[in-house]
Image (cartoon, helix red, strand yellow):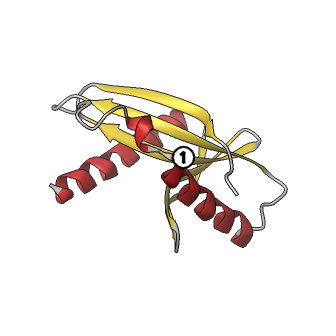
Amino acid sequence: MKNLKVAVGKYGEDIAEEYLKKQGYHILNRNFRSYHGEIDIIARDNLSIAFIEVKTRYNMGYGVPCESVNSYKQLKLCKVAKYYISINKLSDCNFRFDVLEIFLNYNNDHKFFNLFKNAFYFIE
């Protein structure tokens, strides 16, 4: 089951990257890791740096994808983002956290994207 979850997540991130590029995003990094966790995609969108969490689902058995980005997950993402900002000396940039939901059918031939810009804010 874990291998399927990893495969679905990887596939979701791959198609998320394609989708975001078509929306005008410039991908800076994928699967950026630190001690605190991982950010799926980091991209520039106009004048902002977006830290993007991708959630892919085939069904709603685990709930609405964006609901899985709870306060604990948000805190982890904030810590990873702070580290990224620090090591890349980007403190003077605008930042935001986006959540991209991807819904697939079982043939992977129908995709629905739901992008939440500014899904949450920095947590100290």
Mark 1, residue position: 52
Q: Is residue 84 left or right of residue 29?
A: right
Name the image quarter holding residue 98.
top right
Residue at x 77% of width, y 41% of height: 47
Element under disc 1: strand
Asked if 93 appears above or below 117 in the picture, the reply is: below
Whole-percent x, y for residue 66 in the image: 44, 36
Asked if 122 appears above or below 56 in the picture, the reply is: below
Asked if 33 appears above or below 23 in the picture, the reply is: below
Q: Is residue 93 visible?
A: yes
Whole-percent x, y for residue 34 in the image: 53, 71
The front one of 9 and 122 is 122
Residue at x 70% of width, y 58% of height: 124
Whole-percent x, y for residue 11 in the image: 30, 47
Q: Is residue 93 left or right of residue 14?
A: right
Q: In this view, does 82 lie to the left or right of 17?
A: right
